[in-house]
Image: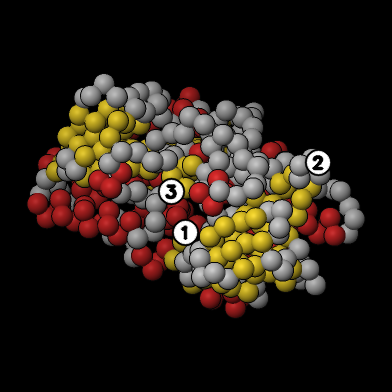
Amino acid sequence: MKKILILGGGFAGLDSAIHLRKMDYDVTLVSDRDYFYIYPTSIWIPTRESEFKDICVDLNALQKAHGFKLLIDKVESINAKQNRVTLTSSKVLDDYDYLILAMGASKMKHKGMENTLSICGAPEQSLQIRDELDRLIERGSGKIAMGFGGNPNDTSAVRGGPGFELMFNVHNMLKKKGIRENFELTFFAPMPEPGKRLGPKALKMMDKMFNSLGIKQHFGKKMKMFEKDGIIFEDDSKLEVDFTMFIPAGDGHQVIKDSDLPTNNAGFVKTDDYSCVLSEDETQSNIYAIGDIASLEGYDWRAKQGHIAEVMAKNVAFNIVSRDKGLSNFKGYHKHLNILCMMDTGNGAALFYRDDKKAYMIPMPIFGHWIKKGWGNYCRLSKLGKMPRIKGM
């Protein structure tokens, strides 16, 4: 039985482990935390609509459900040529036939980042955001800014959706409490038209929502630094705030940057369409990279999302089986590139979709919120094997 080592316990890593175990491979999964975190539904932790435990799935339970081996540890270094992975515990892993990199991305560094919290950062930050909001609610007023940044070296590494969702949910929470008029809410981003990659209809809808909800917009200026009481922009103007939630763009994982793996200018692992890292002679190596850690090639509007990571994971499992059978009918991710987002507002949602042929937006007042809630339960139960996976999800 061939051995496969998977680094990372997020959407990409976990799904590849599940698929490869079904194909009877000996699979070892390395994760730096002992739970799988459902990031898309973490937006409700700060508003107390969900508890932290509701967003976590125990990796030990997932291990028992699917039969892979589990190591809770951090990756210290990777030496691709020597077929060796070293963990923080000093454990060396070199007995594997295939290596799958699924450790996610690092974050772009900004001056004063310690004065911000991110809904897409370490899971524990969702609790800290909740505490900051509680503090302002107890005070009865405040200025709250939320936004995201970009990576000029890789435009696919931006993640703004959760920022929009959290802002809308906070607005809805404050409105329910009857104190919305006491708070100044501002959404900021360095690009002049954040959300443009979703399509022109989405851009118009977002602008309409901001205006109708009384959320100020601060777009088109790069952030110079973050301070405790505000954000300094490139023209030295200052947005005064009591709390800042900021989602920095993704950047190449430091372990990857320090390795001998091929990367793009942002430090993401370069692969072919089949997610395989090519050797120096342009032949396929025994290493695959999936999810946020990989360089995503394609359209200008492309974006790294969980469902694309899952497509990559399923394809890699198929491609490894094909290789071992001496076949070359590999499956690529490029034809599956799209943006799919159920943007929750706390009292409804809107479904956004874009591919190379079309872009559309479907408003889902009230019931859209509960559809996303239902997806969170589906995600948990389906990964535990307690309900069947829906094709394409």
- Disc 2 to disc 1, C-alpha distance: 39 Å
Amino acid, disc 2: Asp
Picture coordinates of residue 40, whole percent (x, y): 45, 52
Does dot 2 land on a helix, a strand or a loop?
loop
**Residue at horizontal 55 percent and vertical 45 percent from the top:** 257
Q: Quadrant of the N terminus?
A: bottom right
Mark 3 vs mark 2: give the one in front.
2
| Of labels 2 and 1, the one closer to you | 2
- Residue 368's tag is 3
- In the rendered view, tell whether residue 42 sits above or below residue 343: below
Residue furthest out toward the right: 326
- Amino acid on which the number 3 mark rests in the picture: Gly
If you read the primary sequence from the N terminus, does the residue marked by circle 3 or circle 2 appear first?
2
Whether residue 1 can be seen here: yes
150 vs 186, left or right, is right
Mark 1 vs mark 3, foreground winner is 1
Near-viewer residue (100 or 386) = 100
Q: Secondary structure at mark 3?
A: helix
Up/down of 292 relative to 189, above or below: below
What residue would you read off at disc 2? 281
Q: Secondary structure at mark 1?
A: loop
Three-letter code for the amino acid on which mark 1 is drawn: Ile
Of callouts 2 and 1, which one flags the residue occurring earlier in the amino acid sequence?
1
Asked whether, in this view, residue 44 is left or right of residue 363, the answer is left
Q: In 3D space, how far apart are the residues under numbered discs 3 and 2 (Cα atoms)?
A: 50 Å
